[in-house]
Image (tube, rainbow, N blue to C red):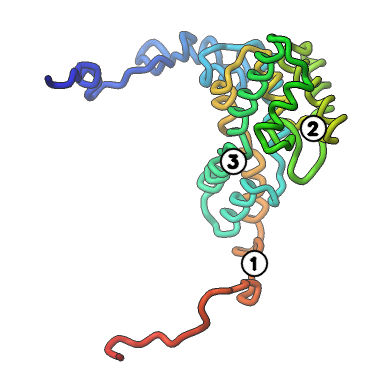
């Protein structure tokens, strides 16, 4: 029996969108809003960014929180892996767009960057489900440690080169200033942190806070990930500009003897026609 291809046949040469688009003579629409009349100059850039990422026009306090997050997670430090790509782009005289986009791609990982939100959400949602069944924070920590060879190295807690997270204190201040209370996910995250501090001298990191806070705002992991797609942009661009304004190829230059070559020793290469 031939495959039913009607769905694809209906889309040959046609573009369908649930988001919106330009209707000539009427305006540009985004999730039912006319962008020029309803959005431009009336809502913030981050409200529109979240609208495009989730389909919902959120209140300004949440958009302001996301703006603060993008400031707090985009440092102009070329030692950071994604920023280093921006700096290399600048020293090699690539375009700022190419360098910045490459840096964004480098931050898209399950081990670091915005990709960790997916696992951070999964952990705190799993933990809350266990807490609702009567499990204590100590029980939850023990279960998660068992998943990781007895070590407290699960997503949202501990850091590889530093203890704690210096950004969290200010984010609690921002959260309070914007009128957000501590919700069910974040309250549990703080209980888990207390257990980890007592038993392992480890603390919550920024991923743990962000995942719990955004889960309390009703966002899914995928929505949070989509909103944060260009989270590191500003820092990458800053590092590009820093090296672009210096002599070419002067960022982390290397001498031949800086390379610890451990391969086969030098050997002659025969010329064409030689045996």
Q: How far apart are the alpha carbons under marks 3 and 2?
A: 19 Å
Q: Residue at x 74, y 27 (%)?
A: 142
Q: Quick check: marks 1 and 2 in contact, CB under 8 Å?
A: no
* Residue 133: x %, y % from top left: 68, 9
| Left or right of 197 in this view: 266 | left
Q: Residue at x 62, y 44 (%)?
A: 237
Label 3: few (<14), some (14–19) or many (≥20) C-alpha neighbours in 10 Å = many
Which residue is disc 2 drawn over?
Answer: 167
> Tag 3 or tag 1, which sits nearer the N-term?
3
Which residue is disc 1 drawn over?
Answer: 253
Disc 3 element: loop
State the quadrant of the C terminus. bottom left
Which residue is disc 3 drawn over?
Answer: 107
* Residue 56: x %, y % from top left: 55, 12
> Tag 2 or tag 3, which sits nearer the N-term?
3
Disc 2 element: loop
Q: How far apart are the alpha carbons under marks 1 and 2?
A: 32 Å
* Residue 86: x %, y % from top left: 60, 49
Q: How far apart are the alpha carbons under marks 1 and 3?
A: 23 Å
Label 1: few (<14), some (14–19) or many (≥20) C-alpha neighbours in 10 Å = few
Furthest residue to the left? 1
Q: Is residue 246 above or below residue 79?
A: below
Q: Residue at x 78, y 13 (%)?
A: 182
Q: Is residue 122 above or below residue 131?
A: below
Q: Is residue 217 above or below residue 257?
A: above
């Amino acid at each position: 029996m031939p495959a039913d291809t009607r769905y694809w046949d209906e889309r040959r040469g046609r573009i369908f969108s649930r988001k919106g688009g330009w209707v000539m003579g009427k305006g540009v629409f985004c999730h039912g809003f006319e962008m020029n009349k309803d959005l431009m100059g009336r809502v913030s850039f981050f409200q529109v960014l979240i609208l495009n990422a989730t389909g919902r026009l959120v209140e300004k306090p949440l958009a302001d929180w996301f703006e603060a997050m993008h400031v707090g997670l985009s440092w102009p430090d070329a030692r950071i892996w994604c920023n280093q790509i921006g700096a290399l782009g600048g020293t090699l005289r690539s375009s700022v767009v190419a360098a910045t986009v490459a840096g964004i791609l480098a931050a898209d990982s399950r081990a670091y960057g915005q990709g960790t939100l997916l696992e951070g959400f999964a952990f705190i949602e799993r933990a809350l489900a266990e807490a609702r069944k009567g499990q204590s924070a100590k029980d939850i920590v023990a279960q998660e440690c068992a998943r990781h060879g007895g070590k407290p190295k699960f997503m949202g807690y501990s850091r590889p080169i530093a203890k704690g997270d210096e950004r969290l204190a200010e984010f609690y201040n921002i959260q309070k200033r914007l009128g957000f209370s501590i919700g069910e996910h974040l309250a549990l995250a703080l209980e888990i942190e207390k257990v980890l501090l007592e038993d392992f001298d480890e603390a919550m990191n920024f991923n743990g806070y962000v995942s719990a806070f955004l889960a309390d705002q009703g966002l899914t992991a995928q929505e949070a990930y989509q909103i944060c797609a260009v989270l590191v942009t500003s820092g990458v661009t800053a590092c590009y500009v820093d090296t672009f304004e210096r002599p070419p190829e002067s960022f982390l230059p290397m001498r031949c003897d800086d390379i610890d070559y451990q391969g086969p020793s030098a050997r002659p290469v025969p010329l064409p026609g030689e045996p």
